[in-house]
Image (tube, grey):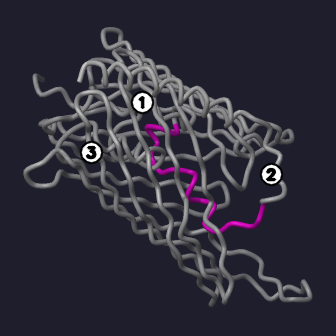
Amino acid sequence: MAARARMRAAVLPAALLALMVLACAPARAAEESAGTRAAAFLSSGNGPAVLGMGGAAIGGGTGLQAASWNVAALARGSALEGAFAHTALPSQGTQDWAAVTGRLRGGATRWAVNAAFRDEGGIDGRDAHNLPTGEVSANSIVLGLQLAHPLGQRLALGAGARVVSEGIGDSRGSGLAFDAGAQANFGMLGVGVSGTGFGGGMRWQGQRWRMPASLGAGLALAHERSGLTLAFDVVSPANYFHSVRAGAQWNWNDRLALRGGYRAELGADAGEPLTGPSFGLGARTGPAWVDYALVVAGDGVTSHRFALSLRSVARMPGAVAPAVIGPQPDPSR
């Protein structure tokens, strides 16, 4: 058993580094794949606790807010948690998300169900001859189920599936997307790998469109005594530029969290909307956490994101190391 544990500890970081090198390769397929995939918003995530750190959560994220980036993050944290998030989009639209998680009876496996509604507002319709047809509405609905299980005190695995429906005017498409991920903890170091939006696909007016598949890897360093966490991710989507994401969080006494981060799309032109800094703030009172994130796009447009989380103070049996991103309540307080 000891030899197996040492082998696992050696192989996982090596595989992670190899994946990070591949993810940092030039994004040659970005322009070729643009516009060939449905539900591109699935890769944007929902939690301001993570977005305030530049979206870096694959290696050290925890709980519901981080599960959009790495489903294995569910294996960390409190036994019961619920969350609601609201985003004011730069396009005058909105995105709302709600989720709840708990554990299966008699075991350490955690489940989560979530739902999201994205309203893009009105868009200018065009016919086959590119003539205006008036303003039409555009919206998306997502329903998801996730499972995560800790293997000992260091490793956690997770998987999930999402049903997606998108509509523009009177037209609507629907399909499936699948996620999987792993996280491991080695003292102060957290590492993770994640795949989101794979398989399935969407049927839209008789045509099949692929989902926005994405592969990523991350590292996180957490110094418990000072409350400082540093996180770094590299992400390789199938339909866009490869990105590098970095962030930091300072957690004071499990009651206040200050966050900052930066996301860069590699090879993108100046003014790329997904490139830019972000800032965040979190505060706890009792079992409730309130999180806020300000995301500044490369073209100068800003978006505001809010979330309210309710968490039990009890941690589930067999849970891996304490939370890194998205601090948990301390039962002693």
Q: Amino acid at mark 3?
A: His
Residue 239 colored in magenta in the image: no
- Determine the image quadrant of residue 91: bottom right
Residue at left offset 68%, top offset 38%: 243
Q: Quadrant of the C terminus?
A: top left
The front one of 159 and 247 is: 159
Q: CA distance from mark 2 to mark 1?
A: 29 Å
Mark 3 Cα shell of 10 Å, populated few (<14), some (14-19), many (≥20): many
Mark 3 vs mark 1: which is more N-terminal?
1
* Image x and y of residue 108, in percent: 17, 44
Point out which mark residue 60 bears.
Answer: 1
The front one of 204 and 133 is: 204
Q: Amino acid at mark 2?
A: Ala
> Which type of secondary structure does the marked residue at label 2 adopt?
loop
Q: Are marks 2 and 1 in contact (CB under 8 Å)?
A: no
Residue at left offset 71%, top offset 41%: 242
Residue 39 colored in magenta in the image: yes
